[in-house]
Image (cartoon, rainbow, N blue to C red):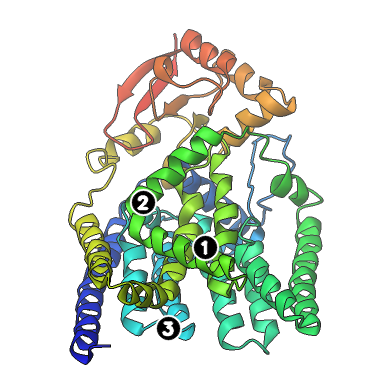
Amino acid sequence: MDPKRSRLDHYLEWASALILLGCAVLALCFAVKTARLPMQFDFGEGDILNAGLRITQGLTPYPDPHGWPSILNPYGPIPYLLTALLVKWFGVSFFAPRLVSVLCGAAIAFLIGAIIRRLGGSWAIGILLGCVFLSLSSIRNWMLTCRVDWLAVALTLGGLAAFIFWERRWYVAALLFSAALLVKYSVVAAPLACGLVLINRREWKLFFRLAGGSVGICLVAFFLTQRWSDGNFAFHEFRTHPDPYSWTQTFEFMGRRLKDMPIVFGIAVAHAGAEAWRKRLTLPSLYFLAATACALTVGKAGATSNHLIEWTAAACIGAGCGWRPVAQWLAEKRWKIAGYAALTGVFAMAVLAVALYRLPFEERTMCAPTYNFLRKHGDNVLTDSVGALLLTGKPVLVSDLFIYTQLVTRSGWSDAPVRDRVARKEFDVILLRERIGVYRPNDRFTVETLRAMGQNYHEAEAFECYDSGYAYLPNP
């Protein structure tokens, strides 16, 4: 190989990596600044903050699902306990929980780089792809929210890194994998990939230690949480997702992500395909394939691109580990210019994504009038913006209207607890993200509940506040 050309590769990779590192730092700083906005960015944020607040009040986040108020929390206990700790220290605010998401995003980017370097890639490519992860608009949007996905992916990637760096200290990986599953039980790609590696090596003792340790920790935590919740945790965790599956939605979301970073996914797929052809799948390729399978959860109704965070990280790791073999193959075929084009394409994509990024709700951040309106009315408020209630000191009567409505429409629940109260005008205010007339039925409210709203309430005021746009008062 031409040493001058090799030096050129080295300099180009490091120059690209350092520029993208600067872009990533700017993205993180912007996320911290935006996280201070006192408003709900996503409906899941309010539910998580409310669960943490309940714990500080001596209540369980997993009460009787058929009781009133109707509180439904579908995730494991760790994110709710962490949020409770933050509420105890910093009060009822979105900033501290969102800061956890930002820190987890930075940790994921670091782990991507460290894993790539450990598995044979260069530091420059590791840094570059870690920063590519942070550059994507969808990733940056979700990093602004206190969603459990960030903590789950950071913990499961931590477990993967522990397995790679300290394989014989299996208990570290087992603890991190278990913690991730106790945040969100669908993050199984990393432990599955590690288990397959051990099976392939026939290292049965280590396999059973890792698998047994992880399962044992999860079982102990499950029974403790079940006892803490008077037996309700299992329902909240495993029976709150009756919503249907759509392959059209799956292909739409995954197709968008492929368009966001086609070269990265292309290299990851090419590397995994070459290893599969040689029947020598390594850990990065196994992880990428397992994460691809887990990303199919994005097809569930109510799911969105937050289900693709781990898939994106796995693609970056797969591409980073496949970068050098692919570049060497191109050089052997005298297509080295294609390698330079790939580096330029990845770099340009990331820089443009950072430069063109805009908040999806930047024109709907004037939430003070919404909160002032709520403070002037009673405490009985029905809303799909739980965060607005928490920031104004109002009680939460229904915590997750999407899950509630799916249980009504697909699991035989009755919508009477909400619908009848609307019909009797028991709610002092109904605060919605959309007007009643254009609200999609059977999404967060049933058709009958929306009809009762239209018959018994009138629009009182409209606001420029994301997720809290329209307030309705009872008819005289």
In this rendering, would 454 be left or right of 12?
Answer: right
Disc 3 is placed on an element classified as helix
Looking at the picture, how far across and down is residue 362, in whole percent? 24, 43
The foreground one among 30 and 292 is 292
Three-letter amino acid code of the residue under disc 1: Gly
Q: Which mark is residue 273?
A: 1
Disc 3 to disc 2: CB gap under 8 Å: no
The CA span between labels 3 and 1 is 21 Å
Badge 3 local density, few (<14 within 10 Å), some, or many (20+)? some
Three-letter amino acid code of the residue under disc 2: Ser
The disc, 3 or 1, on the residue closer to the chain's N-terminal end is 3
Q: Is residue 279 above or below residue 433?
A: below
The CA span between labels 1 and 2 is 27 Å
Disc 2 is placed on an element classified as helix
Three-letter amino acid code of the residue under disc 3: Arg
Does residue 407 appear anywhere in the picture? yes
Q: Which residue is mark 3?
A: 117
The disc, 1 or 2, on the residue closer to the chain's N-terminal end is 2
Q: Nearer the viewer, mark 3 or mark 2?
A: 3
